[in-house]
Image (cartoon, rainbow, N blue to C red):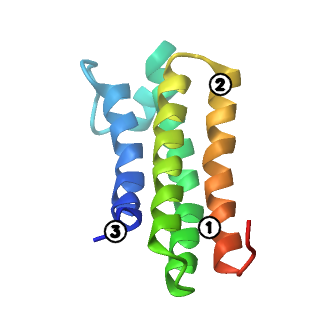
Amino acid sequence: MPFVLWSLLLAALLPLIWAGVAKAGARVDNHRPREFAARAEGYRQRAGWAQQNAWEALPTWVAAVMAAWLMKVPAADMNTAAGVFIAARLAHGLLYMADQAALRSLSWLIGLLAVIYLFLQAGGVQG
């Protein structure tokens, strides 16, 4: 199976990883997990924010991959975009937790550019 399809699973797991980081080692009342998230501070709070952003990025990535797949964009191009997207989104979460705002924003932009690239390739726009 091409990496681009595996990237869908990886992108869907990233929010769960950031949620795990936010909660690891903490006493979380599973009856009221959102209250815990609202009181979190430091890297735990930022990991929660990374989780939210990862969920927000997921639908556009899925749409881009599906558009590229349906329009028969070459697998090598899709795989490259997928590698860039996953690396950028992984960096985004790590930089979020490290409180590196400028670099985090750059990694967010790189991930978005991978999405745009796939849509342009699906639309037949040669880059």
Q: Nearer the viewer, mark 2 or mark 3?
A: 3
Residue 57 versus residue 66 in the image, above or below: above
Q: Name the image quarter holding residue 29.
A: top left
- Disc on the earlier residue, 1 or 2: 2
- CA–CA distance between discs 1 and 2? 23 Å
- Report the residue marked by disc 1: 118
Q: Are marks 2 and 3 in contact (CB under 8 Å)?
A: no
Helix, strand or loop status at disc 3:
loop
Residue in the image at 34% along x and 27% along y:
21
Q: Identity of the amino acid at label 3? A: Pro
- Disc on the earlier residue, 1 or 3: 3
Residue in the image at 27% along x and 71% along y:
1
- Image quarter where the C terminus lies is bottom right
- Report the residue marked by disc 3: 2
The reply to whether residue 17 is visible in this rendering is yes
- 8 vs 72, left or right, is left
Residue 23 spot, x, y in % from top left: 32, 27
Residue in the image at 66% along x and 51% along y:
112
